[in-house]
Image (cartoon, coloured by chain):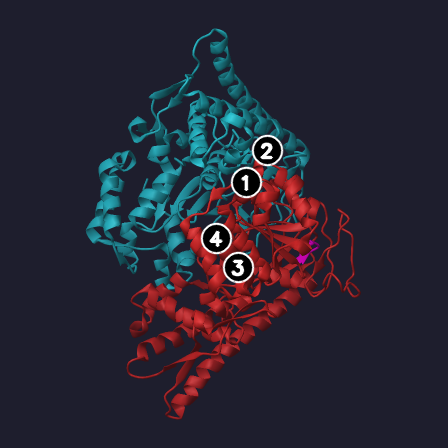
Chain colours: A red, B cyan
């Protein structure tokens, strides 16, 4: 949202029937009535359509630009090259200022030779497919792209691992220019997580451009399922924060009891390590709405170093994605090792794999190595030798998490682990 | 829905702005405006609330009844017994008339003795928790129930596998009385699939009872995420069928291109073997709306004998659930072995595990043994020695599935495999 929490001066605010106002990415207010949100698509639609059109234009330009360089080289009778950033942990740095894993400057070169002619051609055809997809406002999964190639004659892929590798290369190539794979219209095969709470999602129809307004307060015990690609979305919200939840069970409890209503927030179910679409959705929503993100996961090395770390700073072997997918605004609400003591939670002993994961995080992970408080917390967990699930709070009553734990925690967000 | 496709006489029909009418489970019509559906909660709310209240009453009565039998035995100084149906393949039959796997009459008895006192007490406490949950209109996951027990003193569970086993027993016990685990308010930890299309879901607020009307045509490129428990839901729809889809990729394509609009249907993403909530949702929707269900999955033994067979008739080792979860109305749209030939689809060779699964289905599975056409199809697949994914249709263009394959198929639903 252009209109951020602390810069209210230019936004018109109108009360909704629940006494709240919502602001749009375009700095406009629209009224959300109790019955159903009034649809003011005209002005809004134009802005969002314009933004999406501009993004599509930039993407097509980049593709053409890359293809042109190759074409020029051939015209000049030079061997054409393509440069891809090296995708490995060795070519990664953790920028504490930016808040996420960044890919380094190491590049690998693919030159058109007799030996590389097939994969070179395949790379160009894949870029051509991407251009078509952007121009027709369509999309393809990795698998779709593989099967599409069956009509590319000699450039067809024999195996999906080959086409996946080419797509990963193209993704890395364009990531250097700040274009994501989703902007190239290659989308994941899996769905995103579930969302409920104080949020209206704006989603333009792919043919008419008409904006669908999706009010995430209105799904009963169900929820909004995040689409595979979220690039075209915009948001209206008056929420104070996003609560990113590990398990479907806790999400369902908070949703059914309308926790988002009493605590002015947006609930997102990650269902384990969040998918690309879920991470991108949280990041985009958090960026546009200037919203804090609080992670609520199990207290174990997997919850801490896989789920939370991936959400916050990205993952080591896909650092070229971090700029799009990580959520540097995130902090760790719980369950913390100290919570196990403070709330006298039932525990399970740490397994060997847990211990290995925790020690590995302490020794090798640039994120945990940069944060003393995290080192202390992980060392405490190792010393205690136990782990606890977020649902362990049910020992004190099924709704203890809603009535006691979360409200107490949310009064001291400054104390959250970084 | 009480108002079925072919009995229109008593239903008032009103046109929506899209020229369609919707009918409710209560035989009433409400108007779905283009802006947002008008909320006519009063009358409808009472009916749905009454139904849910009646169901809750029946459940509590059953629990009390079971507990009373135990209590009477003790009063008479007899050893009390509980009778659980035996949960194994040997105690299963396939009723072609009913259309699903049924559990047999074999029972195991648990008598209160010195040795069984703990698990007997745990079973009764678990039933007591269920009663509390129904009365407070709340729910618990398996994990919640385990942690709750930590305050049951000597009856506490030491391990979640113990509490899961007791819950499975209680589920089987009450299934004989046609009460599902969800009605006992024990819900799965995982979410359901995604839904889009010509459907309005009616979901009563758990505190106020006010009905939320969720219009599944209005999710943009996103979707409605099925809640963990769907017992309290009701539906309005004018769709002609439900399309149950294996992969998120195909679901996203059909949703983004609004396939449900041109073909008057409801799309459900199963994402592999459908979860309990997804199966129950499809079954309930299909029952109430008298809707056919067409399965669209990969052409391989997993798609056929795991995903489709489980959806249609249930699974062997959980036959006590079939009455609630299977969808006997389902038939198999594709991808069929014959489609691989007719559409010249790219294939992969069958793996050993595929061949084993297929042979096992032919030899041991009561469902496939009852259907000659299925036997022929599976034998054809084995002879061809290959499998094909639903996305293989992308060979002919990304939207070939929308423009050609599905429309052609849907003109000959009578030919679908049973």
Q: Can you tell which mark lies on residue A309?
A: 3
Q: CA distance from mark 4 to mark 3?
A: 9 Å
Residue B386, by quadrant, is: bottom left
Q: Position of residue B9 (x, y in %)?
A: 55, 31
The local crowd at label 2, few if under 14, some if 14 to 19, many if 20 or more residues have their Cα within 10 Å, is some
Q: Residue furthest left?
A: B383
Q: CA distance from mark 2 to mark 3?
A: 33 Å
Q: Is residue B246 magenta?
A: no
Q: Residue furthest top?
A: B76
Can I make out residue B138 in this image? yes
Name the residue located 22 percent from the left edge and 38 percent from the top edge. Answer: B363
Q: CA distance from mark 2 to mark 4?
A: 30 Å
Nearer to us: label 1 or label 2: 1
Nearer to us: label 2 or label 3: 3
The local crowd at label 3, few if under 14, some if 14 to 19, many if 20 or more residues have their Cα within 10 Å, is many
Q: CA distance from mark 3 to mark 1?
A: 22 Å
Name the residue located 31 percent from the left edge and 77 percent from the top edge. Answer: A118
**Circle 2 chain:** B
Q: CA distance from mark 1 to mark 2?
A: 18 Å
Name the residue located 28 percent from the left edge and 80 percent from the top edge. Answer: A115
Quarter of the image where the N terminus of chain A is located: bottom right
Locate residue A409 relative to residue B407 in the image: left or right.
Answer: right
- Write down the region rendered in magenta: A236-240
Label 4 belongs to which residue? A302
Label 2 belongs to which residue? B138
Q: Is residue A298 above or below residue B365?
A: below
Label 1 belongs to which residue? A392
**Circle 4 chain:** A
């Amino acid at each position: 949202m252009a209109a951020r929490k602390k810069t209210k001066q230019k936004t018109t605010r109108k009360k909704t029937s629940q006494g709240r106002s919502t602001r749009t990415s375009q700095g406009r207010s629209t009224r959300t009535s109790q019955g159903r949100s009034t649809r003011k698509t005209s002005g809004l639609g134009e802005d969002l359509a314009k933004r999406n059109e501009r993004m599509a234009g930039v993407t097509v330009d980049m593709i053409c630009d890359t293809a042109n360089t190759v074409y020029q080289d051939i015209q000049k009778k030079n061997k054409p090259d393509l440069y891809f950033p090296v995708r490995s942990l060795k070519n990664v740095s953790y920028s504490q200022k930016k808040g996420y894993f960044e890919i380094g400057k190491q590049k690998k070169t693919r030159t058109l030779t007799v030996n590389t002619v097939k994969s070179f051609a395949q790379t160009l055809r894949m870029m051509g497919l991407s251009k078509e997809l952007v121009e027709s406002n369509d999309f393809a999964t990795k698998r779709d792209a593989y099967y599409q190639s069956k009509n590319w004659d000699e450039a067809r892929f024999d195996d999906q691992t080959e086409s996946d590798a080419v797509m990963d290369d193209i993704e890395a190539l364009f990531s250097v220019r700040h274009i994501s794979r989703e902007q190239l219209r290659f989308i994941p095969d899996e769905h995103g997580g579930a969302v409920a709470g104080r949020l209206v999602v704006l989603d333009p129809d792919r043919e008419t451009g008409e904006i669908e307004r999706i009010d995430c307060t209105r799904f009963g015990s169900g929820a909004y399922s995040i689409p595979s690609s979220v690039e075209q979305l915009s948001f209206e919200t008056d929420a104070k924060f996003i609560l990113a939840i590990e398990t479907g069970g806790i999400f369902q409890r908070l949703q059914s009891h309308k926790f988002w209503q009493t605590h002015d927030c947006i609930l997102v179910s990650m269902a384990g390590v969040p998918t690309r679409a879920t991470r991108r959705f949280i990041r985009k929503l958090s960026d546009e709405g200037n919203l804090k993100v609080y992670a609520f996961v199990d207290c174990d090395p997997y919850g801490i170093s896989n789920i939370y770390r991936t959400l916050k700073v990205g993952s080591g072997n896909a650092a070229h994605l971090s700029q799009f997918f990580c959520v540097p605004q995130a902090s760790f609400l719980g369950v913390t090792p100290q919570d196990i003591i403070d709330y006298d939670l039932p525990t399970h002993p740490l397994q060997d794999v847990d211990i290995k994961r925790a020690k590995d995080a302490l020794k090798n992970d640039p994120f945990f190595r940069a944060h003393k408080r995290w080192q202390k917390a992980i060392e405490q967990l190792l010393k205690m030798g136990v782990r606890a699930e977020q649902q362990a709070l049910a020992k004190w009553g099924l709704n203890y998490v809603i009535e006691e734990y979360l409200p107490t925690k949310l009064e001291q967000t400054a104390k959250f682990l970084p």
